[in-house]
Amino acid sequence: MKTYLLLGTLLCSHAHAAGEGFMNFIRQQQKTTGVVWSMPVVPVGNGPSQLPLEQDGALFQLWTIVQATAKDHLLDQKLVGAYLPSAAISIRTLDPYSAVPRTRADQPFTVTFNVSGLLSGAGLPEASTRVLLEHHLANYKGEQKSIPAAQAISGTPLSSSYLIANGTSEQTFAVTNLKAADATLATGEEHFVIHALGDGSAQQTQLATAHVQVWPVASGTIQGIAPGERVRFHHVTFVVDRKLEIRAQLGGVDAQ
């Protein structure tokens, strides 16, 4: 049996890989035999898998290569099998920037999970009845502005739980879960991952992932005015800190 790859769905959240200067390909990894097959793909479209699905299913990974640097990036991956569920994660914030979800440290955000293909009944394999949800935190260090996904989710998660029903569910956070000496200056990423459980020879495998960038609250001072002074034709300097400059460059909701 072959399966069709919905490349338009996979690529819609990765617009940077759809333009010139990138080469995209699908890598299919057979979970039973370990055979790997790669095929180039256009930014939007669909096509049949090149290998049949085996008993334990197959992992499809969407990669893009920056032609100028030959650096490759894993954009998305989906596990497909005989009874494996499917999942999707989306994140909403108050920031209208659409390329990557992002929020301010003191602002709320909502994570939506959609699961389908779970089975119910007695005597079924556990991997067919539930999926594992993990929530990971990763603080930026120094001038860091992004963290590789594999690194961000490599440590112990902040929380983990099972999703046992098909359909849509949501989690809303009033502020970021990242920690900092001054909570308003927390900066980094929050990652959410849904895994298919291991079953027999098949290992636990990622079904869906999404992350939100967290930026600090902007601050600033006005210099050149004494308390009670009336200003007329006087030089006034508005000094912003590094955090506000970063947000201004990003065009965030509070960049003013």
Image (cartoon, rainbow, N blue to C red):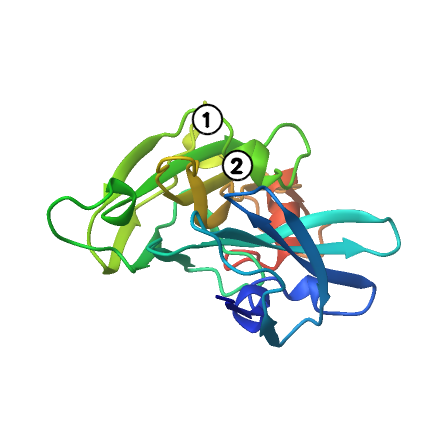
| Residue 248 rendering spot, x and y as whole percentages | 63, 54
Tell which residue pokes out farthest to the right in this image.
Answer: 68
Which amino acid type is marked by label 2?
Thr
| Residue 170 rendering spot, x and y as whole percentages | 26, 55
Residue lying at 38% horizontally and 49% vertically, measured from the top left: 107
Q: Is residue 16 left or right of residue 227?
A: right
Q: Which mark is residue 187?
A: 2
Residue lying at 62% horizontally and 28% vertically, measured from the top left: 141
Which amino acid type is marked by label 1?
Ala
Q: Is residue 67 above or below residue 6?
A: above
Quadrant where the C terminus sits is: bottom right
| Residue 52 rendering spot, x and y as whole percentages | 54, 61
Can residue 231 be seen from the camera position used here? no
Tell which residue pokes out farthest to the bottom in this image.
Answer: 45
Query: In what element is the residue under mark 1?
Result: loop
| Occupied quadrant, residue 119 | bottom left
| Occupied quadrant, residue 182 | top left
Q: Which mark is residue 180?
A: 1
Can residue 24 be seen from the camera position used here? yes
What separation in Å lies between label 2 and label 1 (alpha carbons)? 8 Å
Q: Is residue 21 above or below residue 33?
A: below
Answer yes or no: do the residues labelled 2 and 1 have beta carbons within 8 Å? yes
Residue lying at 49% horizontally and 34% vertically, measured from the top left: 153
